[in-house]
Image (spheres, grey):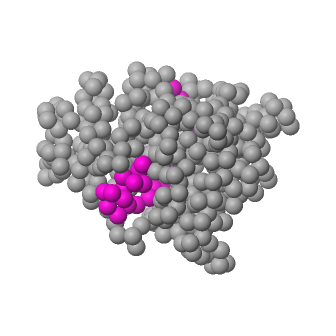
Amino acid sequence: MSDRVETKEELIGYFQGGAKPREQWRVGTEYEKIAVSTDDCRALPYSGPRGVERILRSLVDRYGWLVDDEEDRHILALKRDNARITIEPGAQIELSGEQCETIHCANAEFTQHITELIEVGHTYDARLLGLGMQPVSRIDEIELLPKTRYHIMYPYMARKGRLGQRMMKQTAGVQANLDYSSEVDAMRKLRVSSGIVPILYAIFANSPLCDGGLNGYQSFRGHIWTDTDPDRCGIPEFVFRDDAGFEDYTEFALDVPMYFVIRDHHYIDMTRSPGITFREYMRRGFHGEHATLADWGDHLTTIFTEVRLKKYIEIRTADSQPPHLMLALPALCKGILYDNSCIDAAWDLVRRWTYRDRLAIAEAAQQAGFEARAGRFKMGDLARELLDIAFHGLSRARALNSRGEDETIYLLRMMEQVRSGWTQAGLTIERWKGRWNYDVKLLAEGTSYEAEAWS
């Protein structure tokens, strides 16, 4: 193939090709959402008369979406303009938004998306939940999406960790994608966004329920990633080195075992010969196929670190949120990472932690939210400081909407909640044990995108 690669330098060049001048920087957001049956809060299946595939077909019929991906005549993705709707392994519905110059653009797109989904959901007695995890259905009760990629990954997950199959079928997150101008800029953003991961877990903790009850965590979704696959998850230690560069990330990715290669839209399973890394594949090939830049790009999508490097920076830590908080992650990330003084201030919050500290603090934040401690500081204190830093960055950017409001408006509700001392998970736990009285129907009503509490 014309883009066959044979040297590490060609792989490093992939990342170098992502660099953009400051005036071309954008923010992309990906929103995963838990879809459930209205009557019992159980996971909505992909197939069947009330399944997610029917919802996709209705979006095509009613709102001008186009089918963008199919396998065996099953719809797996839609597109409209610069946005895509894709389906995660457990039929979670994801919007991959366009690359937006402002958070106002992302907000308009997300608002339209959920309005359409809520309207279509009424037809199928389905609703969306503002949670980071399916709260009732167990993994053996959730249909696995009929997509070859996921049918390769699913059995492999069971061999690598105890919780990877939960990750695939039960969890939902929100992700922010940001640009970089150079190798130095990319690694700085990778270092700082990886450094604040424990604080992000506390701020966005929203997965305290699964399998019909409390799971003992505020972000169980976060905990799941710690026991999914040690080869490709977590926070690589090298990112905290001052001299880390694209070569270091390339070396790391080269030694991650591969799931598959794709030829002519068909997947070639590489998990049945476990342990074939991209480094080995590039040297020896696999079943007559040889490494290409397209293979490298596909391989990078199977690396699940908290912050991921591709031709942009992906911050992947946050649990999915109720609608009024969904834009807080991209707003926070833009406010910090696109302002030089703010990125320095954010790093100053966390730079003294050792690598072992970082892992322990992240684990504590997953379990205890704002009450977790980093030395003498509570996560709630650090969360307030981090949000304040992002607020100042967005204030200086002065990106205004039609009403003359800047992008700080997307942080205000989260800042108010952090000041109250309650994580979203904490509020759900309190209501579950209190006014919802362990009733899954009340849980579904109370965490629904349509609930008054989220307005």
Count of numbered marks: 0
- In the displayed structure, would residue 39 be above or below residue 401? above
Which quadrant is the C terminus positioned in?
bottom right
The answer to which of 443 and 241 lies nearer the viewer is 241
Q: Residue at x 46, y 29 (%)?
A: 228
Measured as percent of width and height from the top left, residue 222 is found at 55, 36
Q: Is residue 76 above or below residue 48?
A: below
Along the viewing direction, whichever of 217 and 376 lies nearer the viewer: 376
**Residue 35 on the magenta segment:** no
180 shown above or below 305:
below
Residue 164 appearing in the image = no
Magenta highlight range: 163-191
- Asked whether 190 falls inside the magenta stretch, the response is yes
Looking at the rendering, which quadrant does residue 289 occupy?
Answer: top left
Image location of residue 248, percent across then percent down: 28, 43
Dividing the picture into quarters, in which one does residue 202 lie?
top right
Q: Residue at x 31, y 57 (%)?
A: 183
> Is 126 left, or right, of 148 in this rendering?
right
Residue placed at 36% from the left, 52% from the top?
187
Given the current orientation, which residue lies at the most extreme right position? 435
Residue 381, image x, y percentages? 67, 47
Query: Is residue 318 placed above or below 371 in the rendered structure?
Result: below
Residue 280 appears in view: yes
Left or right: where 437 falls relative to 88: right
Q: Indicate the position of residue 358 as horizontal and vertical percent values.
A: 50, 37
Q: Is residue 2 left or right of residue 264?
A: left
Residue drawn 24% across the image and 29% down it: 276
